């Protein structure tokens, strides 16, 4: 099964994808996590990516596409989080999937009000080691700056700082909103209003995927 999770920065894609991956065994492909891994390792791609990400800009299409190419045919199924972010990436994904002979089963759009998002992002922090997300206001780690799960350092990412957040929203509207229109024209998008607790959103998400399964079988 191939699922694409779309939604603006801060809509909860990472949190939900992680849970979904745990409950279904599907592989969670987060281009954000993969790129941050490259940055941490100091690879050539990482050095290039850091520049773009720190500003809240998107890493160039060819770099992201080649990074994800080897993983999308994974037999356990994949959950794409943060990809595709541009129309070019969406079309490249279609080509790759056609080549691997696996369709996209469901595109899920997590929609949230922009003001709400800016509020959410402003408190967001992440473990640098295991990537567990926290919110410094509503869900902080029990010891300041230290991950509950692995003891790693919890910090606000450069791209969650205010100027970068404003730019990420602008980039989302300009580049990623057309991806949503592209998938809508294929008629395979499940709309989820991603307000409420992570549990509530997860329940809606699971329902959308279950109904998507039967829809695909009927096709
Ligand atoms: Zn951790």
Image (cartoon, helix red, strand yellow):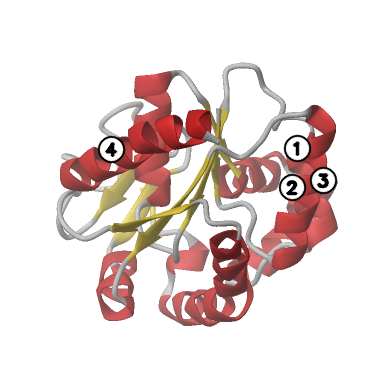
Looking at the image, residue 66 sits to the left or right of residue 132; the answer is right
Q: Residue at x 42, y 46 (%)?
A: 14
Question: Where 151 falls versus 123 (above or below)?
Answer: above
Residue annotated with mark 3: 95
Residue annotated with mark 2: 93
> Sequence-wise, which precedes: disc 4 or disc 1?
1
> Sequence-wise, which precedes: disc 3 or disc 4?
3
Q: Residue at x 25, y 44 (%)?
A: 204
Q: Which mark is residue 207?
A: 4
Position of residue 17 measured from the top left corner of the image (x, y, whole percent):
42, 39
Q: Is residue 99 visible?
A: yes
C-alpha gap between disc 2 and disc 3: 5 Å
Is the residue under label 2 in contact with that under label 1 (CB below 8 Å)? yes
Position of residue 142 measured from the top left corner of the image (x, y, whole percent):
16, 39
- Which tag is nearer the camera, tag 4 or tag 2? 4
SS type, badge 2:
helix
SS type, badge 4:
helix
Is the residue under label 3 in contact with that under label 2 (CB below 8 Å)? yes
């Amino acid at each position: 099964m191939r699922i694409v999770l779309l939604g603006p920065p801060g809509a909860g894609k990472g949190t939900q994808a992680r849970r979904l991956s745990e409950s279904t065994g599907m592989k969670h492909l987060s281009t954000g996590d993969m790129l941050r891994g490259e940055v941490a390792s100091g690879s050539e791609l990482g050095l290039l990516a850091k520049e773009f990400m720190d500003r809240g800009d998107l890493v160039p299409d060819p770099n992201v596409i080649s990074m994800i190419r080897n993983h999308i045919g994974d037999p356990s199924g994949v959950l794409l989080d943060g990809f595709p972010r541009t129309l070019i990436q969406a079309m490249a994904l279609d080509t790759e999937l056609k080549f691997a002979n696996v369709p996209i089963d469901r595109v899920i759009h997590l929609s949230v009000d922009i003001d709400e998002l800016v509020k959410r992002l402003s408190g967001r922090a992440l473990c640098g080691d295991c990537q567990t997300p926290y919110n410094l206001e509503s869900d902080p780690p029990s010891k300041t700056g230290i991950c509950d799960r692995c003891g790693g350092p919890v910090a606000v990412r450069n791209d969650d700082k205010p100027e970068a957040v404003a730019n990420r929203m602008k980039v989302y509207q300009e580049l990623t909103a057309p991806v949503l229109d592209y998938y809508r024209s294929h008629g395979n998008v499940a709309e989820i209003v991603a307000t409420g607790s992570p549990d509530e959103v997860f329940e809606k998400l699971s329902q959308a995927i279950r109904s998507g399964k039967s829809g695909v079988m009927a096709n």
